[in-house]
Amino acid sequence: MHLPLNRILQGDCIEILNSLPEKSVDLVFADPPYNLQLQNDLYRPNLSKVDAVNHKWDKFSSFAEYDTFTLNWLRAVRRIMKDTGTLWVIGSYHNIYRVGAIMQDLGFWILNDVIWIKVNPMPNFRGVRFTNAHETLLWAQKEKGAKYTFNHKAMKALNDDLQMRSDWVIPLAVGKERLKTNGTKTHPTQKPEALLYRIILSSTQLGDVILDPFFGSGTTGAVAKKLGRHFIGIEREKKYIKAAQKRIDAVTPVPAEAWELPEKRNRARVPFGALVENGWLKPGQKLHYVKGKREAVILANGHIKCGKLIGSIHKVASELSNAPANGWEMWMYAERGKLKPINELREKFRESQVKGQKP
């Protein structure tokens, strides 16, 4: 079965997840029912009614029923995730501790808990406890110790070149961003795009597949499209699907030149010898040192020879400069009469590996 990319699938999330190919998704963002257990209507001091979450999809008869539901959808999610994939789950004190325990029981390895601090939380109108001003996100990898995507430099850049912390101060979805139908909120728990922007930018690469099993108002899909990622949404309610699809259709992806550069640590390592054995450079071909008129000959084993110096591009460059050196930045090769940095050739080779091209 082919992945239904950039589509919203209507139906029960567990049934649909079980129909998707195994190990096919890079990232899952889940905003499951919180099981708020609201007993009565809530009113403001002026006696106007609060538009709270009191829908059928958020009601469970007991913690046991909620735990069974959580176990089933998490197990189904785990099956369709790649071994290198990660999972984000958001929740409140009503549910996140139960969800986290079940995640650990299933083998997920928690990487971070992130606190979303709401700039503009709803006040506690009854005055019987503290105002709930945050929600918790759990970020976990499928397999402990597996390689996973974390764009550390992108997060640092977003944060004025300081390391991104695990307390995120982001306002609720309000104003033009808030979807409304006939003057009322289309979905009671619509998440702000800024929150998904940070999640997707931090833990996916361009072209990755992001699945949201509780799609709701479509924030995940809208931000994924904006950032050049694919999405798969699962949602039961037709009214939410209609609103989400309209929202996503209106999104314009960012232009290609604005996409972030890949993180160095997440890119495939390319040894100099790979260029030689794949025919991008040839034994006997000359390399030109960037400082002065020194030349080196490429040897069949991927080393180079410059006078009496023999070794890797890095070792020979270090010897010539009498200092540590990155050989990729110190050698040029000739192409059609012009000298070009071998680092450019490495980038072309890297791209070719993704596309399956030959030199």
Image (cartoon, helix red, strand yellow):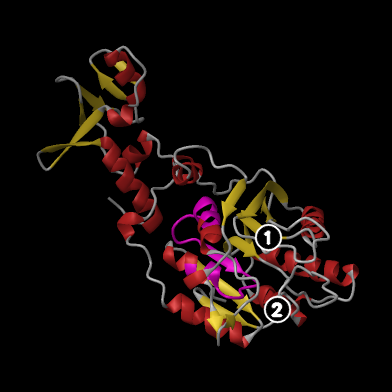
Q: Is residue 284 left or right of residue 174?
A: left
Element type where label 2 sits in the image: loop
Q: Identify the residue shown where x is 37% and y is 58%.
A: 355
Q: Which residues are magenta?
A: 198-222
Asked whether residue 228 is drawn in magenta, I would say no
Answer above or below: position of 66 versus 141: below
Answer above or below: position of 289 versus 186: above
Q: Identify the residue shown where x is 59% and y is 67%.
A: 211
Q: CA distance from mark 1 to mark 2?
A: 29 Å
Asked whether residue 207 is drawn in magenta, I would say yes
Q: Identify the residue shown where x is 12% and y is 38%.
A: 338
The extreme left residue here reads 337
Q: Position of residue 176 (x, y in %)?
A: 47, 72
State which mark lies toward you, 1 or 2. 2
Closer-to-camera residue (222/282) = 222
* Res 220 quadrant in image: bottom right
Answer above or below: position of 175 versus 327: below
Q: Identify the residue shown where x is 76% and y is 53%.
A: 107
Q: Is residue 318 left or right of residue 74?
A: left
Q: Residues within 10 Å of mark 2 (few under 14, many from 20)?
A: few
Type of amino acid under label 1: Ile
Query: Is residue 64 in view?
Result: yes
Q: Which residue is mark 1?
A: 90
Type of amino acid under label 2: Ser
Q: Position of residue 300 (x, y in %)?
A: 32, 31
* Quarter placement of the N terminus: bottom right
Q: Which residue is mark 2?
A: 48
Q: Position of residue 342 (x, y in %)?
A: 26, 36
